[in-house]
Amino acid sequence: MGVACGLTASLALLALPHTADRAGTPLGAAGVGDGVQVTAKNGESAESAETCKDPEASLTPSAADGPTVEKIKRRGKLVVGVDQSSYNWGFRTPPTVTRLPDGSVKETPGELQGFDIDLAKAIAKDILGDENAVIFRTIPTNQRIAALEGDKVDLVVRTMTINCKRIQQVAFSTAYFQAGQQVLAPKSSPITGYDSSLSGKRICTAEGSTAYEALEEKSFGAVYKDVGDDTKDDPDLLTVPNQLDCLARLQMGEVDAVVTDNALAAGQAAQDPAVELKGRPFTTEYYGVAGKLGNDDLVRRVNQVLVQYRQGPWQKAYDTWLKADLPGISGPPAPKYK
């Protein structure tokens, strides 16, 4: 199979300022990979997973500057957790190599681009007046929540699904994209989708992902857990830190298929013509911008940004990054408020 368009699956957490030198320090937060919805008032307990009925409902929009927004303004930078290995969502372009007159070589790091990157820049522009006033920190799937809880980032904009479990751990904005879980496998594979054809097959998912949770609920006899999962002996073969690692495993023949969001899988199929989406999406999921529980003013501000973003910029970003590989989407999901 073909290589993944020069993208590499990064297992490290790198701080990536949106500046010319891209200097940064490692983000060392380790932690779990699931999280859920901020309550209407600070101090109230989050809705439990057992009683949760409408996890996509978020706080009403507001442009007011609360304590979290004021802190960001004093800092002069918005810190956002993103991906750098999801094609068309958050990915890094190849570096530019220039030979100088003295014969030396200068390498300029590639730029972070994609649908989620555009949204993060729009939030920074609204709060700070400059879309480049943002520090990007790349975080694996299973460290998104830990990064928020540890105050390593202000927000996570990283194809993060809103669900009843996660709204107990993080504060979500209104939904900005609808996706669904689907199977990705080689075109020559006998696998037909999320069904009995997975029996006995080795399936790769990202740690802390909704895909892994789906297989826990119903695996059809698939092999999807590593021996030593969540221990120092975890081989990161079937459950991996970053979703793109699954494509690499698939290309090397170490797994038989991948289960992930169709929005991500479509980008991977575009990178490698030897693989394709199998069957149909078997869930309906919504992506939200995640913040730390209790930072209500920032969540309301993001929702205000999304009100405007849905009226034009969303479509432009979709046409630029997603339409070619994920056609047929007429617009963003309608917001829901508490």
Image: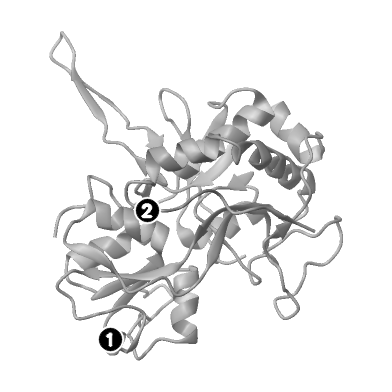
Residue 209 in percent (x, y) is at: 48, 68
Residue 30 in percent (x, y) is at: 52, 60
Q: Residues within 10 Å of mark 1 (few under 14, many from 20)?
A: some
Instruction: Check the image and report above or below for 11 versus 16.
Output: below
Q: Which residue is mark 1?
A: 197
Gap in Å between the C-alphas at discs 1 and 2?
A: 25 Å
Residue 44 in percent (x, y) is at: 86, 63
Residue 140 in percent (x, y) is at: 45, 56
Label 1: state its secondary structure: helix
Pick the residue in front: 253 or 20. Answer: 253
Q: Which color scheme is applied?
A: one colour
Q: Which residue is mark 2?
A: 326
Q: Residue at x 39, y 46 (%)?
A: 322
Instruction: Check the image and report above or below for 13 versus 134.
Output: below
In this picture, residue 81 sits left or right of residue 49: left
Q: Residue at x 35, y 91 (%)?
A: 221
Q: Amino acid at mark 1?
A: Ser
Instruction: Check the image and report above or below for 214 versus 306.
Output: below
Q: Is residue 108 visible in the rendered structure shown here? A: yes
Q: Quadrant of the N terminus?
A: bottom left
Q: Is residue 15 visible in the rendered structure shown here? A: no
Q: Quadrant of the C terminus?
A: bottom right
In this picture, residue 213 sits left or right of residue 253: right
Q: Residue at x 40, y 36 (%)?
A: 112
Label 2: state its secondary structure: loop
Query: Residue 33, located in which quarter of the rendered image?
Result: bottom right
Pick the residue in front: 22 or 174. Answer: 174
